[in-house]
Amino acid sequence: MKKNIIIILFSSLIFTLVFTFNSAASETIEPLNPIQSQNRQPQPQEQKTYYSESSGSVPLRLCFLPEVWYWPRGLNVYGLNLGLPISYGEGENMYGLDFALIASMTDGVKGLQASLVNKGYIADGGEIAIVNFAERLTGFQIGAVNSQISSDAVQLGIINMSQSSNGLQLGLLNMMDNGFLPIFPLINFSM
């Protein structure tokens, strides 16, 4: 049993590291052309974003309760966001493993989010919990109950819910607004 747990943890760590370095390497900065910027119309802002203009980063952030205490604030995390008992982060980039004893409430994770309950705005990678909530998801969700608004993802659970998805659901009850049927047992996929 211990060997299986060690293998699972090691595999998760490898996945997180590969995904983190792959995501960070694929990001580019677009140069600003002064002639084009004068003619450019202002774009409407999204209601909520999780990317920041932070100039620094840390390998570890410790969290206690949302908006009560998490340290350090205002820096990107490339590594581990540890919640004792709840992980949290709003406005900073989080690349790597977001782990909490009870709940992960980090807004933007590129990597793996693991807890009893995961609730995030954007998740690029994976979510593993008893209950997973994400507004936008790219990757996978594994849990008893999985819910997302829009995604390019795979959901594996007992109950899977999605409003708009380009993905696959495997579970006892699958609900997808744009699925081949809105509600279907065992499997559902987008049309």
Image (cartoon, rainbow, N blue to C red):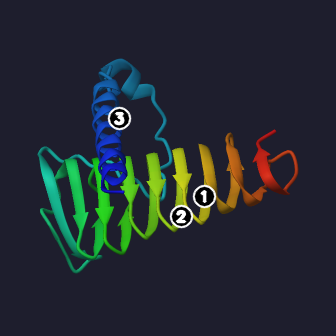
Q: In this view of the protein, which residue sits in the foreground, 11 or 109?
A: 11
Residue 81 vertical placement versus 58 (above, below): below
Q: Give x and y (percent) for residue 162.
A: 68, 56
Q: Which residue is mark 1?
A: 148
Q: Give x and y (percent) for residue 31.
A: 29, 21
Q: Secondary structure at mark 1?
A: strand
Residue at left 61%, top 45%? 154
Q: Secondary structure at mark 3?
A: helix
Within the image, what quadrant is residue 84 found in?
A: bottom left
Q: Earlier in the sequence, mark 2 or mark 1?
A: 2
Tell whether 58 sits left or right of 155.
Answer: left
Residue at left 34%, top 41%? 11
In three-dimensional space, the C-alpha distance between marks 2 and 3, rounded to whole angstroms, equals 21 Å
Disc 2 packing (10 Å; few <14; some 14–19; many ≥20)? many
Q: Is residue 90 visible?
A: no
Q: Secondary structure at mark 2?
A: strand
- The amino acid pointed to by label 1 is Gln
Within the image, what quadrant is residue 18 found in?
A: top left
In three-dimensional space, the C-alpha distance between marks 2 and 1, rounded to whole angstroms, equals 6 Å
